[in-house]
Image: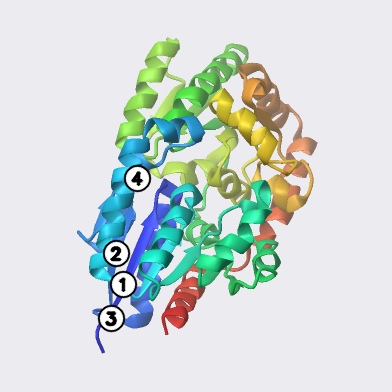
Amino acid sequence: MSAKKIYLISGEVSGDTHGAELMHAIESELGQGGVSFYGAGGPAMREAGGESVRDWVEKSAVMGLVEVLKHYAWFKKQFRSMLAELREIRPDALVLIDYPGYNLRMARAVREALPGIKIIYYVSPQVWAWNKGRIPKMAAVLDKMLCILPFEKPLYEDSGLSTTFVGHPIVDELEENKIDVARDLHLIGLFPGSREREISKLFPVMLEAARRLHNEDENLRFEAPAATEKLGELMHKLMGKAKLRGDYVKITSREDGGNHKLMQKARCGVIASGTATLEAAWYGLPYCLVYKIALPTYLLGKVLVKIDHIGLVNILAGKTVVDEFIQGDADPLHIKEALEKFIKDGDHTEKVQREMAEAVSQLGEPGCHMRAAKEVISTIG
């Protein structure tokens, strides 16, 4: 039997991690030599798939309408290049991992140009938040939806799209990265995100909150993990501009344990909206969420988004479990006050940790990537 050919596309750091784990699981099921991988992702997917998988994630992980428009010509070039590759390779399946702005356009183009290819979506787009009307259009071009949040399954099934809830990918990854470490009561985590734009907007605000907290308690220390070396350089530059006195803020790298180690040893933290907020909740790190994007993108989002919360923990819980500071509210004062409450009010901290645990318990058991791999193989046939 000839090797199956699978083309995968991910455009963000979290998607790169999920994609690489999925690739390992598929190879485990089909055996060595049973599958060949192609596509685009980040360093983890390239390592899993080899030279036929391009690493584009540092440039592709832009956020918001304004930021995407600035890079429109580059994205258009990448889109044409990938579509040409797909025409040449003619894989058995195209697996799209999150990244809906790009991937849903690719799904439509591939369905029209190469109707025989199975198109599978892994880590379903959050259209339930901004446009449920797109679901029937997605059903028309996709063969399979692999959703990671329990409430998503009936939404897609109602449109006639074959859908499986496989559990959330982070459960596997977080379980693997679990360590036995006591929380440092003087350590606070700063998690400014994995995109240049959000780091530029949020890290200075976090640093100012750290300065204010340290002015009141010199025993406090702060750590900020950088997702890549390039982002680490940016964070060091922003620290230089902040002119912090002393060495109470430390920037760490993936080699130091990254987000996951810090989430398990810090007392509390402030986190940019995204997957990291779910990871922190799973590890029991009490935190506040911050979110700040270009004003035109935010104003457009206010019109389109139809949900009360942006944090997944709050969405899963159906109520406010962690504080969300958005746009103008994402300021040093709000962050300082939220973190101070965790430091000074034990009952408040325990309540937040308990409600976070209840929310993330809905994410399913470990084994998500293997369940997803089996669904991909079954869909190929």
Q: Position of residue 137 (x, y in %)?
A: 58, 61
Q: Residues within 10 Å of mark 1 (few under 14, many from 20)?
A: many
Contact between marks 3 and 2 (CB within 8 A): the answer is: no
Of the residues shown, which amino acid type is indicated by label 3? Gly
Q: Position of residue 171 (x, y in %)?
A: 55, 60
- Sequence-first disc among 2 and 1: 2
Which of label 1 and label 3 is nearer to you?
1
- SS at badge 4: helix
Q: Residues within 10 Å of mark 3 (few under 14, many from 20)?
A: some
Contact between marks 2 and 1 (CB within 8 A): the answer is: yes
Which residue is identified by label 2? 86
Q: Give the residue at x 65% y 20%.
A: 328
Q: Give the residue at x 46% y 79%.
A: 379
Disc 3 to disc 2, C-alpha distance: 19 Å
- Sequence-first disc among 4 and 3: 3
Q: Position of residue 50 (x, y in %)?
A: 22, 61
Of the residues shown, which amino acid type is indicated by label 1? Pro
- SS at badge 3: loop
Q: Is residue 38 visible?
A: yes
Disc 1 to disc 3, C-alpha distance: 13 Å
Which of label 4 and label 1 is nearer to you?
1
Q: Give the residue at x 79% y 45%.
A: 319
Disc on res. 91: 1
Of the residues shown, which amino acid type is indicated by label 4? Val
Of the residues shown, which amino acid type is indicated by label 2? Leu
Which residue is identified by label 3? 34
* Location of residue 251 by image quarter: top left
Q: Nearer the viewer, residue 246 or 339?
A: 339
Contact between marks 4 and 1 (CB within 8 A): the answer is: no
- Sequence-first disc among 1 and 3: 3
Which colour style is shown?
A: rainbow
- SS at badge 2: helix
